[in-house]
Image: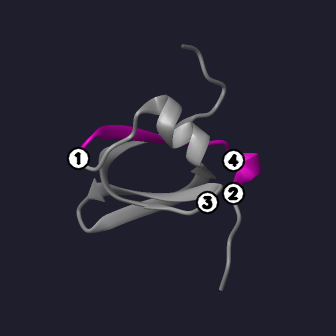
């Protein structure tokens, strides 16, 4: 699979909080760093994501939101 995104963070899924339509997937990147993403429940099911699975957080620079 080829991707145009340059930021590929590999880690382990530590938590999946499912709602009725959306799910929050948390990935431990190591060194005390985590990242979370909100995706559809359908995506979680189609990718068969489970706690303990290795996963990649792929981030496109134009899709990043910053809050304070």
Q: Residues within 10 Å of mark 3 (few under 14, many from 20)?
A: few
Mark 4 and mark 2 in contact (Cβ < 8 Å)?
yes
* Residue 54 located left or right of residue 36: left
Residue under circle 1?
Answer: 52
Please indicate whether residue 14 sits to the left or right of residue 49 in the image.
left
SS for callout 3: loop
Residue where numbered disc 2 is placed: 64
- Which quarter of the image is occupied by the N terminus? top right
Q: In front: mark 2 or mark 1?
A: 1
Q: Is residue 56 one of those drawn in magenta?
A: yes
For marks 3 and 1, the one nearer the N-term is: 3
Q: Are marks 2 and 1 in contact (CB under 8 Å)?
A: no
Tell me where residue 23 appears, x and y as whole percent.
54, 57
Residue at horizontal 71 percent and vertical 65 percent from the top: 65
Q: Which mark is residue 20?
A: 3
Classify mark 1: residues with Cα within 10 Å, few (<14), some (14-19) or many (20+). few
- Image quadrant holding the C terminus, namely bottom right
- Sequence-first tag of 2 and 1: 1
Q: Residue at the location (39% across, 40% down)?
A: 49
Numbered disc in front, either 4 or 1: 1
**Residue 30, how many percent across, how many down?**
24, 57
Vertical placement of residue 52 versus 46, above or below: below
Extent of the magenta region = 52-63
* Mark 4 vs 1, N-terminal side: 1
Q: Which mark is residue 28?
A: none
Q: Position of residue 62 (x, y in %)?
A: 76, 48
User: Dot 4, crowdedness within 10 Å: few (<14), some or many (≥20)?
Assistant: few
Tell me the distance, in whole angstroms, between the alpha carbons under discs 4 and 1: 27 Å
Residue 61 is marked as 4
Instruction: Indicate the secondary structure of the residue bearing disc 4.
Output: helix
């Amino acid at each position: 699979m080829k991707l145009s995104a340059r930021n590929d963070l590999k880690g382990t899924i530590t938590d999946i909080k499912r709602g009725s339509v959306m799910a929050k997937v948390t990935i431990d990147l190591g060194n005390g760093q985590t990242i979370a993403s909100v995706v559809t429940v359908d995506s979680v099911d189609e990718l068969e994501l489970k706690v303990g699975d290795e996963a990649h957080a792929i981030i496109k620079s134009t899709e990043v939101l910053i809050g304070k």
